[in-house]
Image (cartoon, rainbow, N blue to C red):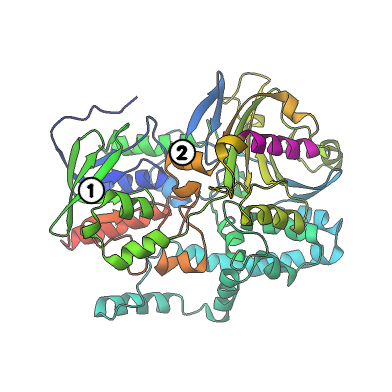
Amino acid sequence: MPDSTIAASARQYDAIIIGSGHNGLVCANYLAQKGMKVAVLERRHVIGGAAVTEEIHPGFRASIFSYLMSLLHPRIIRDFELRRHGLTVLPCSDMISSVSYDDYILFSEDMKKTQESFAKFSQHDAEIYPVFDAYLQEATKIVRSLLWETPVDPAKRDWKNFRESAAILWKYRKIGRKMYRLVDLLTMSAYDYLREWFEDDRVMACLAYYASIGTFAGPKTPGSAYVIMHHIMGEHEGAGGWGFIKGGMGAITQALASSAREKGVEIFTEAAVGEIRVSGGRATDVVTTKGDVFRARVVASGVDAKTLYLNMLPESAVPADVLREARNYRTFSTAFKMNIACERPPQYRILEKAKADGSLGNFPYPTYCHIAPDIDYLERAYDDAKHGWYSSEPFMTLCTPTIVDDTLAPPGKHVVNVFGGHAPYKLKNGDWAVEKEKFKQTVFKAIDNYAPGFSGDIIAEQTLIPPDLEAIVGLPQGHIFHGELSADQLFFQRPVSGYADYRTPVKGLYLCGSSTHPGGGVSGIPGHNAAREILRDVKSRKI
């Protein structure tokens, strides 16, 4: 249901936010907190962007797109009192990864447990793991600090840019030789990076798996090592680094929306933006596809940079080099999502062994599992996609939130979220209209290999391939990060060079979504950083 009815005449605000994803709502909250009159325009009937909870079958609700909590920063949770607005983080079991039909690796925050599991396959890998973890965490600590920085433009030669660049260099002057660790992460493949430490392919696959999530890359693709770190940068409190949200991921954006409304923010649903009007080099109006006009001195877009630059703005308002970089910004996705209503969760072949080993702790069932037994399995899945087809044996994450959350399914029933790869946005010599059902059966077969009979327990399912992710929620080519997390698309080059500071060539127009630094994931940091830059410009009367 829409929060408000849009009047036929233009409405006047201090700021308009395009898109009600978590970053847009974070940005809206910070601006409203400083007394600005803010409107949020959402294309869909439901707020939340990719962090939404919706019904997939009568009585069954699922986190439709984003499905696990990790990156949402404690600072944002505190700043907006999200727990008071209904945010509850539920525990998630340690991750279990099947390395064969009858054995598994346990990956835990408990160092000793992880070492014991690694030792089943390599004593060397078990012994070196604490050293590797400390080494990686030192690099991660640096990057966590950089997340909050506004990227500088190294090509500018004005005094302001020199001062800001010098300030960042001074702030991080003690990094020293640790900088080389970041260079390695940005340039090396996950496999090459890990094999400097580990010897067993199954152990390496447990870690390299994270380099493949949402990325059109395999573990042997140069630059894929950085994506490992991107997925472990979460600092949220409780639930051991990963967790479920009670009521699904939509509870995050509902809490953000509730906080925003308290501050006077108006949220409009079914308000798709058709164009942003520009006059004298300045954004003036946001016009919906229905013809409704919203006017403000600040416009912040949570949609991806490609859509903003290529579809919402007049071509004459954007410099040719920015348009060229926007067109070439890589968003090609091979990620898929499946939401399943079922009689019971997957009965993994390793389930009884995991129980007997005591690997589940206080959990009756492993709520968080991977299917990717070794490096070659991950690489073959990528090879299929690299040549234009979906993986014959996809790698997958399977999560069962209903083990700890009884709000998502009827008593005794369950919801399983499946996320994996690869399913290319476009097929070579194929059509998804024909192949989607075949792909679905490929996924079921892969799950049944490790959890026999699961496909027979399915009540209903929702399969989302990249074209679906793009059509429903606006992810560019279905890319969950709004663009590849590669060295040429990070920091001062994200999304385009010269405009990585959340500003655009159009005065008063900003980007606050995942296509900006530091990238995708439900962190809220792009929204925070964009709001900070907007408020700086407002204070200095630049807008």
Is 55 placed above or below 482 here?
A: above
Residue drawn at x 42%, y 62% as measured from the top left: 328
Picture quarter with the C terminus:
bottom left
The verdict on residue 389 being magenta is no
Is 422 placed above or below 57 here?
A: below
In the displayed structure image, the side of residue 158 where residue 173 appears, left or right: right
**Separation (CA) of disc 2 from disc 1:** 28 Å
Crowd band around label 1 with a 10 angstrom C-alpha radius: few (<14), some (14–19), many (20+):
many
In the rendered image, residue 76, in percent from the top left (x then y), is placed at 42, 49
State if disc 1 and disc 2 touch (CB < 8 Å): no
Residue reaching furthest to the front? 429
> What secondary structure is the magenta-colored segment mainly?
helix
Q: In the image, which disc is placed on residue 78?
A: none
Q: Which residues are magenta?
A: 437-450
In the displayed structure image, the side of residue 353 where residue 400 appears, left or right: left
Picture quarter with the N terminus:
top left
As helix, strand or loop, the secondary structure at mark 2 comes to helix
Q: Label 2 amino acid?
A: Ile
In the rendered image, residue 77, in percent from the top left (x then y), is placed at 44, 45
Residue drawn at x 36%, y 48% as measured from the top left: 302
Quarter residue 233 falls in: bottom right
Circle 1 sits on which residue? 276
Residue drawn at x 74%, y 61% as measured from the top left: 204
As helix, strand or loop, the secondary structure at mark 1 comes to strand
Inspect this view and state whether residue 531 appears.
Answer: no
Residue drawn at x 59%, y 48% as measured from the top left: 429
Is 203 placed above or below 166 here?
A: above
The residue lying toward the viewer, choosing from 267 and 132, is 267
Inspect this view and state whether residue 245 appears.
Answer: yes
Q: Label 1 amino acid?
A: Ile
N-term mark: 2 or 1:
2
Circle 2 sits on which residue? 252
